[in-house]
């Protein structure tokens, strides 16, 4: 919240309903003159306070780098490349709850600093306002007939005020940037039902099926894959590195079958199918709550550009309606997006990474919903329910877990994970995750909607932005192919080394019913 | 120096030995440098050329075959960008925001069309004895070079990953070529026939103009690629087989196209001979390349180190297990089975109807849940 624009050299464009192509998309700000405490707007217009249109300002030319931040000329403060529409007033008014939340999530966000910066910011704003008013008074006085000495005095006074204003406005800019940087680390609030604590505090929501009892010694998916000639990890290690793989023969058909079946099933439930770019600007990755350039980042960056590879279709789908105001009638927007995903898996090691469990590249179908705030809880239930249906249809045994506060990740208000039984590994492994991100992502991506009631009020007019709200966004894995294949191979193996194909997939695999060992 | 010598004679020999050793070190160093320089220069020498290939620039290319004619429309036609907009099939604008130009989202029936095309193509090519594969899309840059591409040249087509020696593939030809890198294959295994599905990434540096509007030239796309490793004497005939499969596939989809034997200046360094298929794109009002079939003979295999051991050598006891004189370099060939964006472009533009709908070619319908037609959506 708060008008965050950079003064000096700004230009404005009217915000259209759809996404706006812009030359400076990586360095734009969203202006939102909503509450009375908003006092940024006067920066751009020395004489007035109102900014009737929702505008999109170009940041000052200093912000034009490939990094998340850039240094300002005097090298003291890093400038954020983009600004999140954070509700500072709300944070201040609810600071105990915010502090408790930060602690529960084990986050290292510095709330004290955020509040301090905000106070200073407000004070500097007041001072700037005061000086501007004084300058107006002086300007008005100069319009009348004056003695030369009086005029001279006024001119000096005016100049003095102007100089002080320039300094303060510069401070304001620095404070705004610092505040942004600190505040962006504050994690989303948490649903009251979420258990507080570490992974072992997570609550069991549901169990479907039981672990299948095998009457013979079972194999893991790596061994099954080798015997059935389904994967090649060795050649991939040569040409690409570890945690890469080729899929061969029926495994390719299994991937095609899983993706096709999943897309059709989710489309039937009213989701619009999409394929997405897999190379995106790093600012979009950050706005979704990921860190492209942190140590142990999960994100691959493209050399010589500000682009990255996506780790999930959540990112390009979140970006579709970036910087837009959607008519309420359009909500909810429900997408099922298919893409390849790329993750560095920096810092991950151990036996859990053998075979297909943890890989650098994989295919995934992801569900994404944009909705009104009051509906996000119920859509979260809908998403997990769709996932449970899909996995049950495939005959998998799994449990759904309500993730504890330390395991949520900054964007999620609440997160349900599905962990499927992987007999070859002898344990449960995560095959899917459904998160309600409430307005965390939408405040960063700038996705709002206009409630319909405002349209019927003639007084408000077309341009009245007081009525726009941030949407809530949710995302959920419909199918992450490698782990699904792992589950299917390990669960459906037979004593003779063959693997049965679950019924729902067969029509999407040319009718194939079973994967049998090949004769040599 | 092994015999009994006078001290002075021994000393003379020691000095002579040292002198020879020093001269050898210098020469061996020269040898190393020369070897490297020679490699660098020689790697630029393009593959030899098939005798039937026309000499000259693009306009010298020979027409091999024409299938069908340009469909006559009885109404003013639209290009695929307009059709896509009206049928809500693509989003270029949002993609330009989040990624840049020449990126796109596909929506609704276009997604089903991509799935249908890939699935149908894989099944059709599998039926002809090709092993289906999916491949890594991030590979070491050395593999890219060994296939004949230039990851780090100016105007390179190749995206590199920051902080590593890895690149994104521009075609599955690269990871498939890499599978048997530095190997000796038993002759009985040949020919090896793969059909590989992957996403492909190209910088398209230096490409501009109207031909790049819409789906014609994009940075990321899905592609099914055929790849054959075979004995040298068979590569010409497998080249014919590959182009024949492509022509079958495109005919089945009802496209009108011509097959061209590319002229010498248009071959690209690895190809001994290259056939391009250019399909009629009514919205663009011209033919556009939808596929390419190249015979790279031993150009790639000499760089990737892919050899085979002819069976006759196994029966000669004198040669023994380690005798490499009997190994030969395989020949490699590659051919596009389906490059999705241009196929979708062709299908939309050719199958459009006056009311703005688009008919789905019959072979694809079973792979699209039975969908027969893409109709404008009611608002």
Image: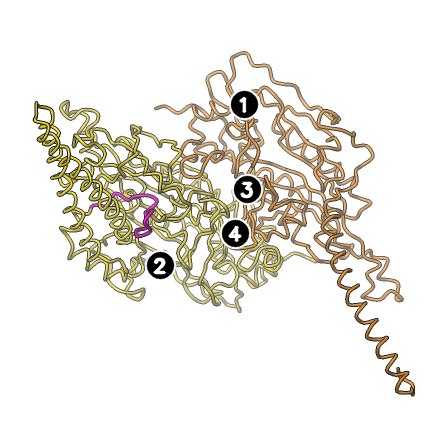
Chain colours: A yellow, B orange
Asked if the stretch drawn in magenta spans residue A74, the answer is yes
Q: CA distance from mark 1 to mark 3?
A: 25 Å
Q: Residue furthest front?
A: A149
Is disc 1 surrounded by few (<14), some (14 to 19) or many (20+) residues within 10 Å? Answer: many
**Earlier sequence position, callout 1 versus callout 3:** 3
Q: Which chain contains the residue that carries disc 1? A: B
User: Are tags 1 and 2 found on a single chain?
Assistant: no
The number of callouts visible is 4
Which residue is label 1 attached to? B349
Estimate the x, y position of residue A250 in percent, counting from the top left: 58, 50
* In this rendering, the label closer to the viewer, 1 or 3: 3
Above or below, B26 against B339 in this view is below
Q: Which residues are magenta?
A: A73-87
- In the picture, the disc for residue A501 is 4
Q: Badges 4 and 3: C-beta atoms under 8 Å apart?
A: no
- Residue B267 or B7: which is nearer the viewer? B7
Residue A83 quadrant: top left
């Amino acid at each position: 919240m708060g008008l965050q624009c950079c003064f000096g050299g700004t230009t404005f464009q009217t915000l259209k309903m759809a996404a706006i192509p812009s030359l400076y998309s990586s360095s734009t700000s969203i202006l939102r003159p909503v509450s009375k405490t908003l006092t940024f707007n006067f920066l751009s217009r020395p004489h007035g306070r109102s900014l009737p249109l929702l505008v999109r300002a170009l940041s000052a030319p200093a912000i034009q780098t490939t990094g998340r931040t850039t240094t300002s000329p005097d090298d003291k403060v890093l400038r954020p490349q983009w600004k999140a529409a954070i509700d500072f007033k709300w944070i201040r008014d609810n600071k105990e709850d915010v502090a408790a939340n930060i602690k529960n999530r084990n986050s290292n966000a510095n709330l004290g600093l955020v509040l301090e910066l905000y106070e200073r910011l407000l004070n500097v704003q007041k001072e700037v306002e005061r000086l501007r008013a004084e300058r107006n008074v002086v300007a008005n006085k100069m319009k009348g007939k004056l003695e030369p000495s009086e005029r001279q005095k006024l001119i000096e006074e005016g100049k003095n005020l102007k100089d002080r204003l320039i300094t303060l406005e510069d401070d304001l800019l620095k404070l705004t940037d610092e505040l942004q940087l600190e505040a962006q680390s504050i994690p989303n609030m948490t649903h009251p039902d979420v258990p507080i604590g570490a992974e072992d505090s997570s609550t069991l929501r549901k169990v479907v099926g039981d672990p299948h009892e095998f009457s013979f010694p079972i194999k893991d998916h790596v061994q099954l894959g080798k015997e059935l000639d389904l994967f090649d990890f060795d050649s991939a290690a040569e040409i690409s590195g570890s945690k890469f793989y080729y899929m061969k023969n029926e495994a390719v058909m299994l991937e095609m079958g899983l993706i096709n079946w999943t897309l059709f099933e989710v489309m039937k439930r009213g989701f619009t199918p999409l394929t997405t770019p897999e190379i995106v600007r790093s600012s979009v990755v950050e706005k979704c709550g990921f860190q492209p350039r942190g140590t142990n980042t999960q994100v691959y960056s493209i050399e010589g550009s500000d682009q990255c590879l996506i780790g999930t279709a959540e990112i390009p789908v979140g970006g579709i309606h970036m910087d837009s105001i959607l008519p309420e009638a359009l909500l909810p927007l429900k997408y099922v997006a298919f893409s390849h995903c790329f993750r560095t898996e920096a810092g991950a090691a151990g036996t859990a990474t053998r075979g297909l469990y943890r890989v650098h590249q994989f295919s995934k179908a992801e569900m994404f919903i944009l909705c009104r705030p009051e509906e996000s809880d119920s859509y979260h239930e809908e998403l997990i329910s769709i996932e449970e249906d899909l996995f049950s249809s495939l005959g998998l045994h799994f449990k759904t877990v309500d993730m504890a506060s330390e395991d949520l990740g900054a964007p999620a208000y609440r997160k349900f994970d599905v962990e499927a039984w992987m007999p070859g590994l002898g344990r449960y492994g995560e095959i899917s995750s459904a998160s309600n991100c409430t307005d965390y992502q939408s405040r960063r991506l700038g996705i709002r909607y206009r409630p319909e009631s405002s349209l019927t009020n003639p007084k408000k007019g077309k341009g009245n932005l007081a009525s726009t709200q941030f949407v809530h966004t949710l995302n959920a894995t419909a199918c992450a192919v490698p782990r699904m294949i792992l589950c299917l191979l390990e669960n459906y193996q037979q004593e003779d080394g063959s693997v049965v194909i679950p019924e729902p997939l067969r029509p999407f695999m040319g009718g194939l019913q079973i994967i049998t060992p090949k004769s040599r | 120096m092994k015999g009994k010598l006078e001290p002075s004679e021994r000393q003379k020999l020691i000095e002579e030995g040292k002198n020879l050793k020093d001269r050898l070190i210098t020469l061996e160093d020269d040898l190393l440098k020369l070897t490297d320089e020679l490699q660098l220069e020689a790697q630029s020498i393009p593959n030899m050329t098939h005798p039937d290939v026309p000499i000259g620039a693009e306009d010298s290319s020979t027409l091999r075959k024409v299938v069908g004619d340009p469909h006559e429309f009885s109404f003013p036609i639209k290009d695929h960008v307009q059709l896509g907009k009206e049928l809500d099939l693509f989003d270029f604008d949002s993609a330009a925001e989040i990624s840049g130009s020449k990126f796109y989202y596909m929506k609704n029936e276009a997604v089903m069309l991509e799935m249908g095309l890939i699935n149908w193509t894989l099944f059709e090519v599998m039926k002809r004895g090709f092993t289906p594969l999916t491949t890594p899309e991030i590979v070491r840059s050395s593999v890219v070079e060994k296939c004949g591409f230039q990851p780090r040249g100016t105007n390179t087509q190749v995206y590199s990953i920051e902080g590593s020696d890895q690149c994104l593939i521009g075609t599955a030809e690269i990871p498939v070529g890499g599978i048997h890198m530095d190997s000796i294959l038993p002759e009985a295994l040949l020919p090896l026939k793969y059909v590989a599905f992957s996403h492909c990434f190209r910088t398209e540096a230096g490409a501009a103009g109207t031909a790049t509007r819409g789906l014609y030239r994009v940075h990321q796309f899905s592609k099914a690629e055929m790849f054959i490793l075979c004995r040298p004497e068979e590569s010409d005939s497998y080249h014919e087989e590959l182009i024949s499969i492509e022509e079958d596939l495109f005919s089945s989809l009802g496209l009108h196209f011509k097959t061209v034997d590319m002229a010498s200046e248009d071959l690209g360094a690895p190809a001994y001979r290259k056939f391009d298929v250019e399909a009629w794109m009514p919205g663009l009002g011209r033919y556009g390349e939808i596929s390419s079939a190249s015979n790279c003979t031993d150009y790639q295999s000499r760089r990737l180190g892919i050899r085979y051991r002819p069976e006759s050598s196994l029966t000669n006891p004198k040669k023994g297990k380690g005798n490499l004189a009997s190994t030969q370099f395989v020949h490699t060939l590659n051919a596009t089975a389906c490059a999705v964006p241009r196929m979708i472009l062709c299908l939309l533009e050719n199958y459009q109807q006056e009311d703005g709908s688009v008919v789905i070619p019959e072979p694809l319908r079973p792979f699209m849940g039975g969908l027969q037609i893409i109709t404008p959506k009611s608002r």
